Every structure is written in structure tokens, then in C-alpha cells.
Image (cartoon, rainbow, N blue to C red):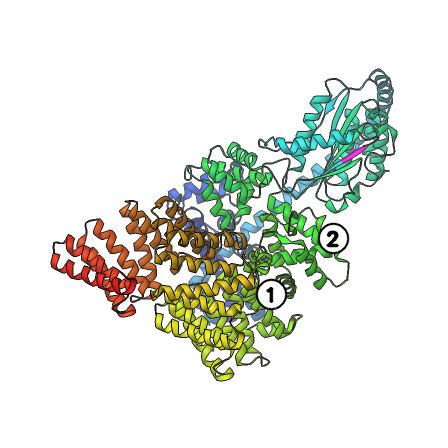
Amino acid sequence: MKKLGPEHIDVAYARNNMICHVTTDILTEGLREIFKQEWDSHYKATLGEWKDDPKNGSDFCNGESPRNQNKHARLLATMTKGNRAEWDCTMLFYAILFSDCIHSLNPVVRSNVDKLRLFRNEEFAHIARGHLSDVEFQNAISKVENAFLALGLSIVKIQELETQTYFPTEQLRHVLKKVDDLKHEVQEKEKEVQEKEREVRRKTKIFKKKRKVIQEKDKKLQEKGKELQQKEEQRQTLEEQLNSEASSFCILPPKPSHDVANRDSDTSKIIEQLKALKKSTGLSYLYLSGNPGSGKSQMASLAAERLFCEESISTASFVMTLNAENPKTLLESYATFARHLKCPEYAVTNTFTSKDLSTDEKIISLKTLISTKIELYSSWLLIVDNVTNMSHLDGNLPDPGNGQCAKGQLLITTQDTASIPPSGSFIQHIPVSKGMESHEAGSLLEMLSGFSDPKMEKEVARVLDYQPLALASAATYVREVRKNKLTPNFSWDDFLKKLDQGKRSTTEAMLAGSNPSYKNSMTAATTFAVKKTIAADKVLEHTFHFLSVCAPHPLSLQIVVNYLSKVNKEPKDPEIFATRICKCSLLLFEEDNSGVYIRVHQIVHDVINNVMKTCAENKELEAVDGAILSFCQVIGHEDDSHTLIRSKKIVPHLVTMSEIIDGLFSEEGISDAVKAGSSTPYDYRNYFKTLGHTCQKNCEFRSALTYFNVMLRLTQCDDVFGDEDVVNAYGYIGTVHHSLGDLQQAKECHDRAITIFLKKLGPEHIDVANAYDNLGTVHHDLGDLPQAKECHDRALTIRLKKLGPEHVDVANAYDNLGTVHHDLRDLPKAKECHDRALAIRLKKLGPEHVDVANAYDNLGTVYHDLGDLPQAKECHDRALTIRLKKLGPEHVDVANAYDNLGTVHHDLRDLLQAKECHDRALTIRLKKIGPEHIHVANAYDNLGTVYHDLGDLPQAKEFHDRALTIRLKKLGPEHVDVANAYDNLGTVHHDLGDLQQGKECHDLALAIRLKKLGADHVDVANSYNNLGTVHRALGDLQQAKEFHDRALTIRLKKLGP
């Protein structure tokens, strides 16, 4: 070892001194850094960054409570200067861990700073000066080093000490002095503690003496108390005899901290039912059931108060509320009840405070006291509130067989719907889960929020399912936020955005913290109810699992029962499942001609989802698997209008489930999911196809694409499937891409399908015809009409040969071919094709099938272009009528019918009716297929034409600009629909006086049409005509004449003289 000079000291002896250096210097430096870090985190934006100046010290001291200022005056005398370099460890530990200024410490920071404090005060302070072994040194140094690492502090100086072979003598003296100071400080504190302990022992001795004296006096007082109690009992017995006459009273459930709506309709219904029950002989019962926050207690209170006001005027009556939330609250309510009935106080108190009786025995004893008084009243109503479990009330309510209770009624509020007995002559049940009336909900929001916005109040009430607690929480939150000077204009729209962001529990907190009558938020109460239901009932647990993969929309009870039959391990009759479900207060039920439907409030749906997320992943897969089977069982496999009608209410659930299925049946997980499921790969393939087609027919194209993509994954990953299965999946995907306006993607899918079909099946197979038909439709929308015609001709030829002339698929081919002939301006041929399609469909499908509507729509378009506007209107009216009936008012095919009908009204010069039709078409399309679909562009184009003819040229230009933007993006710069947009935009620019811009648009339209349609197409004639008009306005009459001549020549040739 290196020989050390006098200025150094040997390592073995230095280890002890190194620990001293770490504790007195390095540890202190680290604490100063932590303090500054925490101060800046708390106050940099308000009091400013810590700069070790007197202002910092003053701000710190001013932030301390008077108690801390007195207690730590010695420390604060130095700390108030603000210079951390003058602060020792005691001051720094106080500032970080115990001061009022530095609060809400991160648990990691608090824990590790406290470890450093304990090391310094309890371990280091008691290390004897002298030799310190390697193990002891490493243990000590590791504690500090680990804490520094956890606090994010540099450990470089610590590591340097660990490897250091000498320790400077001068530095040692400095360190040892600090150590001596520290030990002196610790010794002084230990002396102070010992002195305090001696003082405590002295005072304890005095206290024991005094306590003995007090106990002796207390014993004498108890003896006197017993004498007084006996006297009081005697006095009360005499008083009872004097006060035997009954007096009316009304004790209602606690009122909330806010005003409540009157709910006149619901309250009147409860009163009417109570009055009807009163006609029965003996005690009668009315149950109010509902989910948490539905207003059961307040409705009971409103109804009881009105009844009491009616009856107490002429007779002795009472209303009393028993809080039946738990046995303790019920006992307390009975004691209060007995006192209001003027039962002897000594008897009530003795019973209530007895240590020898159980709670149930105390209640029975109080009931006996009460029963002697009840018969003095001519009528009474007992509200049994907040019943969580009806079985807990057995024996704790007035006995219906007791003649003394014959004049009374019980109004019971509960969530335990399953335990409510069947209705009869003396028992009735009113469910209240549906919430408030719409107008009452709006009024409550206005009253509690302090401002009026009727339209948004109606929307907020709908979103919150008209639930009183949810409405009160929302209004309270909005009112308080608007009081903040930073957000005085906070609106209901802003509130709904909070809900969309998943911050509902935040909006509920303000009311929950200040509402004595209901201390739980809507979310907390619902969560408790859901968890309790799941724990108590396996059938409802399975039901909630099913609902967690569905949308918060009505769901057929029959589907749920089918699901339970599949997943419930204990077989039961369907009727038992249905009965158990119908008795759950968290579920709502609706009935129409198609059956009974389950519905849940949005808050219940959200809570069910959150609770179910905590379950194992296989539970979600089990729920999805059962849901797939149950939905497919109801949808069926027939492709008819009845299937569409049956599936309409299922579709929202399929949309929600598609996202879950996409995750469970991902490329990585699909094999495991299929193996874990209950069906074969072939069955799953068919299920996904059925669900995809159902979504597609109901315009939920994104969800349809998800199901078909999962179907494709399945056929690609499992060897049981062949090329034809894969190709079919591509075909389905292609049709959805087409519907979504992704035409190139659709073309790629159909091209791939045809290539493989031709190779595997030959040129005359029906599947080849279907693929040609799909591809032809895509070519049509891409503007390649000759190629579209060729595809549809091939499809028609194969189908005529394989299926015969009257098959509905032949009608489809005629329809598609007719559309192409129409766009090629061969109108007679187009009419012939559509007539044939209509005849076949009427014969095979009946007059109200949606495919018949399609034929009418196409015929209407042909009649329109032939100039027969009345006949065109009749066809489009028929198409619209059928579609509204079969598809509902928001289907994209209904939008198509409105669009076509609007075009006819436009040409009939009924412009306002035309605008209304196109507006409806646009609204449906924006909602169903999004703002960038080519059909949305068509609606914009049509609306632009109507606004142009109404004289609103700026609005017309805006709509044509939107149409052009979408078409350029989706179809490319050379599509004929892009030419149409340029043509319409050119006409608007012309009428706005911007002739050069008008000419440019018409030139672009002409160029596209000449290239895509040929020189003799009537749309080319339209372009020539429009250009002639522009040139005439520009004063170039010779060029104008030339263009009009060309237009006339084409029209004479194509349309006749």
C-alpha cells in the first residue's frame, strides 16, 4: 500500500470518517437539491423559483402555520434568510417532510428522504468513532447511495469515496467537527426527551389519583341517576296517561342539498296507487324500485308529503321514514319513530342502549312499544327507504296479521327488484328506472345550473337518461365551473365534451361531496350495485358479460335468453332466465310488436364495461363467442326483407362487437381464439360472413369491413380452407370498399377474385358471374363505362344460361346493365333493361321488396332523362315509400331515393321541395358514410344546382366546390363526375360574372368528357353548349356559334329532333 503523508490518514481508519463526510456534507447537499426541486414544482408559477434570497425565505416562513412558526422558531430564524447553504440537515428534513409549504410529496420522494433522516438520526449518530469494518462501511454507504438513486440525485461523490485510498486530514477535521456538532445536538435532544418523559410520569401519577376520586364520585352519581330514572319512569307513565291523544307528524327522507323537481306525473301515479291500495282491508304495500340515482326516495317523499297534507287536516295521521339501508340505521329510525309516537322515553332508551339484546331483538321490542300507539291514528304511511336486501327486513316491519296495523300503508323503496312479491289486492309495484319526464329534466337543469339553454338542456337530459342524480350532478358542476372567472361561459356543450372524454366521475364529485341525502356519486352507487348483483346472481353475471360486448341500445330479451342457454353451465328453462333478468332494477324493458327488449342507461353500460374489464380475457372471449352464436341465430341465413327488419335492432350491437372481435381475432390471436371457441373454423367463417353482410345492408360499412377482414384472416390461417374461400372473402371486402368509395381498392379485390375464380371454376360458373357483376359496378363508378358494360354483359350471359330468365340474379344483371346504358345515354336500352328487372322482381319478390324499390328508382332516373317527369316522380315516390318502410329513415338507399326525387322536383321547378329532398339525402349520407364519400359529393352537387336556381350563387359555389374537392380526391382528375362538377362550377362562375373562371371550368369538363365518353356523347354536347354561352358573354360570337352548332348536332343525333 502507498505510504501516506501526514496530511492523509489510512483507509481502514478513514472509512469511519468517510461516513461522517457523506452524512454531514454529501447528504446535506442532496437535501438542498431536493428541497429546491420540490419548491419549484409547487411555487415556480406563483411565488417564483427558489434562488436562495431573502424573499424565498420570507415566502417559506409565511407559508407555515402559526403552530409550526411557534414550534420551530429556532429553525425558522435561520431559514427565513432563504440561503440553503446555511441550512443544516435538521432544517432541510423539516422543510421537505414536515413543513406546510411542501405538501403532497411524491411517495418515492417522501419515503427515501425519510430513510435518509432515519439513517442520520438513528444509525449514524450512534456509530462509535474509530475503526469501521468493510461490511459496516458498505452497508452504511449503500443506504445513502440507494436513496440518492431513487431520488434522482448524483452519486458520483459517494462512488469516489468508495474507491478513495486516503482521506485529507484537513477535510477530516472539518468533517469530525460537524460530527461532534451533530452528536452534541442528538445528546441535547435525548436529554430533552428524558426530561419530558419524567414530566409525563409525574403528571400521570397525579392523573391516576384524580381519576380515582372522579370514579368514586361517578359511582355516587350513578346511584343518584338510578333513583332519578325511577322517578322519571313514574313521571312519564303519568305523562303518557295524560297525553294519550295522538298528534299528527310527518318525517320524510332527508332532502338533498339542492332543489328538486316536482315530478308531478310520477308523484300523482304513486298517490293514485296508494289511494287504490287503501281500499283493501289490512296493511298494504307499494314498492318503488329502480337503479341507483333514479329518485326513488325523493318521489316517495313528494308523494307522502302531499298525502299527509290532504289527510292530517281532518284526522290524526302520520308519515314516518325508516332508513333500512342497514340494521343499525333501521334501529335508529325505530327509536326516533317510537319517540314521535310518545312511547315512554325510559322504555325507548333502555331498549336502544341495552347490551343484552341483539339489534333484531331491539327492533322487535321497539315494534311492540310502537304497536300500542299506532292504533290511535286513523291512517298512517311508513316509508321504508333505501332497502338494499329485502330478506334483511324479515320480521323487522309491521306485521300484516296484526290488527293494530290495519289502517296503515308501507311505501318501500328498493333496488332489490328480484325480491318484490307479485302484485295483488294489497301489493303493487311501480318501477321508476326510466327517469324523469323530458320537460321536468330540462327544468331541473335550468334551475340548478342557473342559466337557460332549452335545446342543449334537452340533449343533456337525453344523454344522462333523465336520471335525477345524474342531472343534479351535471347542473351543480356546470354552475360551479361558471362561477370561476376563467370559465364564466362554460356551456352544456362543454359539459358533453367532458363526458365524451371519459370524465364523468369528475363532474359528479362536486355534488357527491355536499349532498347529505346521497353521499355516493351516480358512478360510485351504480358500481356498487353492479358488483353486488354479479356476486349474488350467476345468471345476471352472464347477462352483464353479454351486455359488456354490446352497445347501450335495446337488445332482444330472446337473444339474451338464447345466449344464457349457451353459456350457463347449469341448464335451466328459458322462462327462468327471463324471469331472473326481468327482476333486475339495473335493466330497463321495452316492448313492441317484435318482442321484449332490454335496455340499460349509459351510466350502467359504462360501469358494466369497467367492471367486466377486470375479468379474465377468456371471459371476454366466452361472451363474444356466445354473442356471435346468439346474433347469427336470430339473423338467420335467408337474404330477404324480413331478415333485414329482424337485424336492424341488432346492428348497433354488431358495430360495438366488431371492434372487440377485431382485437380478439387479430392476425396474432385468431388461431388461439378459434381453438378456444365453441365452433368449427367453417362455422366461424359463416358467422363472420353473416355479421358482415348484416352490417353492410344496414350501411355500417366500417364494421362490415372488419368482419370480412376477420373472415379473410381465418381463411388464410387455417389449412381447412381453399383458394375459393379466400377469394370469396376478397369479393366481400371489395363490395364494402366500393360502398365506402374506395374504388381502386374495390377494383383490386374484384380483379383478384375473378383471376382465381376463372382459374379454379372456369368461365361459366355462377361465382364468376357475381365477380363480373361486382367489377362492372366498380368500373361504372370509376367512369369506365365500356368496361363496365362488358363485365355486366358477361354476368348476364352466365346467369341466363345457368339460372334461367326469371331468376332474381338475372334481374340484378339487367338492372346493372341498364344503369350503364343510361350513363352511355342509350336511354331506350336502359329502360328495357330496368323494365325486365322490375318484372322479374315483382314476380319473385313481391311489390314491397327493397330490390323492387331499386328497380323503380332506376326506372325513374331513365324516365327523368327521357323528359317524362311525372312518370319519373311516380317511380321515385314508390321507391322511397318501400325503402322508408323496409329500411328506416336513415338508410343510404333512402338517401338515394330522396336525391333522385329532389332532381325531379328541381326539373319540375319545385325548388323548395327539391332543396328539402337533397338536404335529407345529405344529412343521411354524412351520418352514415362520412364527409368524403362520393355520394356525399353528389348530394353537394345537387344542392349546389338548386341554390343556383334559387339565386343564392355564393352558396351554390360553396357546394360545387365541396363536390369537386371530394371527387378529385376519390376519383382522380379525369373521372366524368369530376367533369360534371367542373361544368356546374363553371355555370356558377359565369352567373357570378367571372367569365374567365367559368370558361376554364367548362374547358376542363369538355376535355374529360371527350376523353372518357367520346365526341358524340350528350354530356359533351352540354359542355359545348355551356362553352358557347360563355364565349357569347365574352363577345366572341363566332366561337360561341361554333360551340352551339356542335352541341345541336350531337343532340339531334342522340336525342332526335
Which of discs 1 and 2 lies nearer the camera? The answer is: 1
Question: What residue is pinned by disc 1?
Answer: 638
Question: What residue is pinned by disc 2?
Answer: 536
- Nearer the observer, 112 or 826: 826
Which picture quadrant has residue 570?
bottom right
The C terminus appears in which quarter of the rendering? Answer: bottom left
Tag of residue 517? none
Q: Main secondary structure of the magenta part?
A: loop
In the picture, measured across the screen, residue 994 lies left or right of residue 734, that is left
How many marks do you count on the picture?
A: 2
Can residue 418 be spotted in the picture? yes
- Nearer the observer, 186 or 708: 708
Residue 965: x and y in percent read: 32, 59
User: What residue span does the magenta drawing correspond to?
Assistant: 281-285
Callout 1 crowding tier (Cα within 10 Å): few <14, some 14–19, many ≥20: few
Residue 884: x and y in percent read: 51, 52
Disc 2 marks a residue whose amino acid type is Ala
Residue 600: x and y in percent read: 62, 49
Callout 2 crowding tier (Cα within 10 Å): few <14, some 14–19, many ≥20: few
- Nearer the observer, 246 or 438: 438
Residue 737: x and y in percent read: 44, 67
Residue 850 counted in the magenta span: no
